[in-house]
Amino acid sequence: MSLYKEGDILLGMYRVIDLIGVGNFGEVYKVEVLKGRYAGQIVALKVARDKTMLPYLWKEAQTHILFNHPHILTMQSYLYKKDRGELFLIYEFMDVGNLKHYVAKHGPLEEGEALKVIFQVAKGLEFLHNRGYIHGDIKPDNIFGKRVMKSILWKLGDFSLLRVRGYSGIIDIKGTVGYIAPEVFKNQIHRSSDIFSLGCVLYFTLTGKSPFDAEDEQEKLRRNKLVIYTMPEGISPKVQTLLGLMLEKDHEKRFKTAKELINYMLAQRLL
Ligand SMILES: Nc1ncnc2c1ncn2[C@@H]1O[C@H](COP(=O)(O)OP(=O)(O)OP(=O)(O)O)[C@@H](O)[C@H]1O
């Protein structure tokens, strides 16, 4: 059962409209802001209650709130209620939901549309890469869409596995099998590891599946680690080349940063 119901007022200023979904760390609600500079706006409010994770989520919020880019999900504010052991995180409301649900509902995207999504996410990723960050968990669930006029604006979200470039500690492999760069399994992570994951997202938008999809989880893990996949049918040679470059097993042969990917897409007129 959810923590709050329609009509409840949270923190004296958010009226619950609906429960959007339940994640690993809490519940996400669609709410209306009743007071302050955002009064009248609809936002997404996440209530996190996992005690062991609260310090990490709080740290993530302190970093996320500083990010300001059209292709990065905006966090408006956060509030930690120590007495209740609850962290409230306020984000802009993304009416299209995440890319995983979008493709599940509408089916695989046509090539031009898929490239638009990847290009927009690459723009958000470029913002992070320029500041020396690695996202660490790029997957369709962490890409959110918002309707703007007749098109959809796609944004990158969820910074729970964000790392600083040059990170040399132990890498807990918390990413999602099917989207993890092969070097991450060997305790190495680079900005190019995000490019590999984004290549998996491109594959997903074109086919509805991760490139390493298999009936059995062990087999999926094996294919992901060894980068065993088949090129989707019916895609143009240009996009096949792009996929091959993004899913390059050797990270040194991949695009090193989102900027390199963006430059390549522009030079090849992939938009
Ligand atoms: N800002 C937002 N606008 C609209 N929907 C959102 C927003 N943030 C999250 N959601 C949706 O709410 C649901 C729960 O999200 P949440 O991030 O808590 O769970 P999750 O995707 O399982 O991730 P986690 O790994 O953090 O548990 C998902 O369907 C997600 O797409």
Image (cartoon, helix red, strand yellow):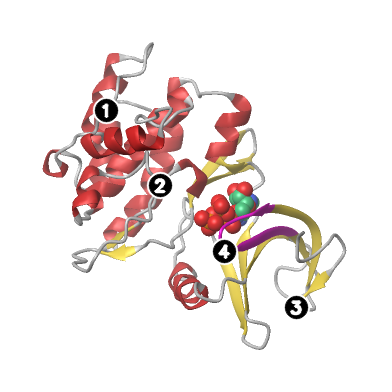
Percent from the top left, x then y, of residue 104?
58, 30
Q: Give, as a single range, the part of the protein colored magenta.
A: 21-30
Amino acid type, mark 2: Thr
Q: Are marks 4 and 3 in contact (CB under 8 Å)?
A: no
**Res. 176 mark:** 2
How many labels sit on residues? 4
Q: Nearer the viewer, mark 3 or mark 2?
A: 2
Residue linked to disc 3 = 11
Residue linked to disc 4 = 25
What is the crowding at mark 2: few (fewer than 14 residues within 10 Å), some, or many (at least 20)?
Answer: few
For the C terminus, the quadrant is top left
- Spatial CA distance of label 4 from label 2 is 16 Å
Percent from the top left, x then y, of residue 160?
44, 63
Residue linked to disc 1 = 242
Amino acid type, mark 4: Phe
Q: Is residue 210 above or below residue 88?
A: above
